Image (cartoon, coloured by chain):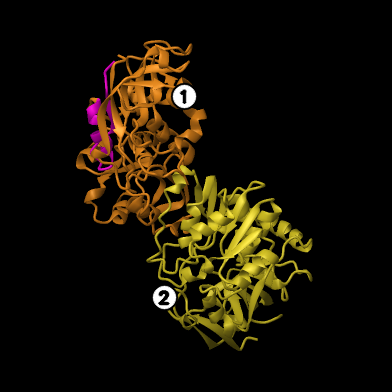
Chain colours: A yellow, B orange
Amino acid sequence: MEGNNKQVIFKGYIDGIPKETDMEVKVAGSSRTAKERPKGALLVKNLYLSCDPYMRGRMRQFHDSYIPPFVPGSVIEGFGVSRVVHSDNPNFKTGDIVTGMTGWEEYSLIQEPQRLRKIQQDDDIPHSYYVGLLGMPGFTAYAGFYEVCAPNKGDCVFVSAASGAVGQLVGQLAKLHGCYVVGSAGTDQKVELVKNKFGFDEAFNYKEEPDLDAALKRYFPQGIDIYFDNVGGAMLDAALGNMRVHGRIAICGMVSEQNLFKPQGIHNLFHLISKRVTMRGFLQSDYLHLFPRFLEDVISYYKQGKIVYIEDMSQGLESAPAALAGLYSGKNVGKQVVCVACD
Amino acid sequence: MEGNNKQVIFKGYIDGIPKETDMEVKVAGSSRTAKERPKGALLVKNLYLSCDPYMRGRMRQFHDSYIPPFVPGSVIEGFGVSRVVHSDNPNFKTGDIVTGMTGWEEYSLIQEPQRLRKIQQDDDIPHSYYVGLLGMPGFTAYAGFYEVCAPNKGDCVFVSAASGAVGQLVGQLAKLHGCYVVGSAGTDQKVELVKNKFGFDEAFNYKEEPDLDAALKRYFPQGIDIYFDNVGGAMLDAALGNMRVHGRIAICGMVSEQNLFKPQGIHNLFHLISKRVTMRGFLQSDYLHLFPRFLEDVISYYKQGKIVYIEDMSQGLESAPAALAGLYSGKNVGKQVVCVACD
């Protein structure tokens, strides 16, 4: 296992949206012999890698963000689920399943294992869920909905990218909270999922709506109390014009803002005043004190069958560049994960 | 006093910014004989009329706002300070000085006197202050700063339209709160006032800054904790790019948004996420429970010489259309008031 190591390499900084060709799969001779491992480091075998929209930000030469850019020529980093194959660290033992930041490669040397979390293995819960429903995207939905959106029973809730890794859970939590929930998605297949699998009250295909403002007025004749924004751009602008008094907008993703250096203009901010709307950008990492409660709540909902989760699983490390690039054109149906190895 | 009544008439709906010619001064034969007055109404002589940026919104045919548009052919309405000349209402007596919504005319019949507030007369406080420092604009500054901006001692605060009716008080309250405060204004004379009269730490003339982003980086090398936005547009966009983590933006005016139907695009909203910024539109009317405390605090500060207030007083009802139009080109220096009569 310490021989050759297949890796996905970040080729260099981009301006637009990530393309498959911005990454390349290479085989590196491993330098991970026991002698060269820093003390306390872990060697892990990566099982599942997470494709998340924020990763585009790390492919840009933009240093003023909450997370530094990737280094050209280096292995892509991201959330993953991995199995410990060698540990010098008393907190981890061989065979443990861990989740946290890892490399897009078959084996990774984790220098700061204190940043990993051990997974309680449970036959009812797929390991891959720890980068989705029970990982960063799920926690983003949980913290964003309960802490940023301040929901009340009966609120009218709109979720964009509703079939995505975050959106699908936001909508289901909102339904459990007694809200009226409408989602938007970019294909009829996703709309079908949002309505019939995730149980939103309504859903629509935004690509088939010539007038987003009219679409929102149709689904929210009384206006929107909560908009959980995963896309920014034209949908955010349309939602701004349909907010109710004291509405809340959680700004989460902005996937549609394809180029941070020339993002689309938002024209409807003046509605913030007359409707006294609060718009808040957030990162799940500010709410980590709630993580244990999140895990407990969501695992319990899941086991009771009150929530479901859909993943789009691509097979093999070679499929990772296309899987990541596909996020930005909405190719994935559900949470995009790459399966590197099953165990 | 019940003979002819000079009035400022709203001619018809506009699209752009208000011009002097959108209003006309006419003399109406009064119909305000005692017999025709509804029971409980007040007849008042208007002393001071307030010119406020929000009034532009009422000159547009836009019914989805928090306040209905003006009626073409009718008298302009706005905040004023007036003297009661006839009262059938037990709560008011002749000679009382009142403030609240009135007409832009010499005499007004107030049909709902319960919406007026009686002023405690005090020789140290000019009556006109009750449409400025001690009226809606002052209260906007107070509620916006304390309730929306959630200030902490040492915060770095930026105020646009800093010499205006609201901005001048925001900056002074922020200084009293122990903040570092920078203001922007549109002439060197205003910048001078902001620094030397209102005691901001720094001020700059935004019209002389080719790059607003660079200007803000100069004054806020560590970033902005609180931006009290009175203008929207390019300044808001520049501020978004210079916010600190967990910064707050109070959205108050958007004077620069000259045409609600084609407002300027905002391109920097993605910073809301990485900096976890809260942006909140507000109206002072949501905070009226704080009004008594506001009056007490601000009157006390004023009497102790801890705050000052600058008005731009135009003389005579005939001057009112030009005074209102002047707001939108920044002609006024300080709070714009029209003196209709001295007593």
Question: Could you tell me which chain the residue with mark 2 belongs to?
Answer: A
The image quadrant where one finds the N terminus of chain A is: bottom right
Q: Secondary structure at mark 2?
A: loop
Amino acid, disc 2: Tyr
Cα distance in 3D space between marks 2 and 1: 61 Å
Q: Nearer the viewer, residue B241 or A223?
A: A223
Instruction: Judge from the rendering whether residue A142 lies leftward or rightward of residue B47; answer left or right.
Output: right
The image position of residue A333, as x and y in percent, is 62, 73
Task: List the residue tagged with mark 1.
Answer: B115
Q: Which SS class for mark 1?
A: helix
Three-letter residue code for mark 1: Arg
Residue under the point 41% across and 52% down: B243
Q: Residue A286: give its label.
A: none
Magenta span contains residue B330: yes
Callout in the foreground (2, 1) = 1
| Whole-percent x, y for residue A173 in the image | 67, 56
Q: Quadrant of residue B36?
A: top left
Disc 2 designates what residue?
A: A13
Q: Quadrant of the C terminus of chain A?
A: bottom right
Vertical side of A189 occupied by B106: above or below: above
Residue B301: image quadrant is: top left
Instruction: Say which of A28 and B113 sits in front.
Output: B113
Going 71% across and 54% down the picture, which residue do you hit? A176
- In the image, the segment drawn in magenta is B317-343
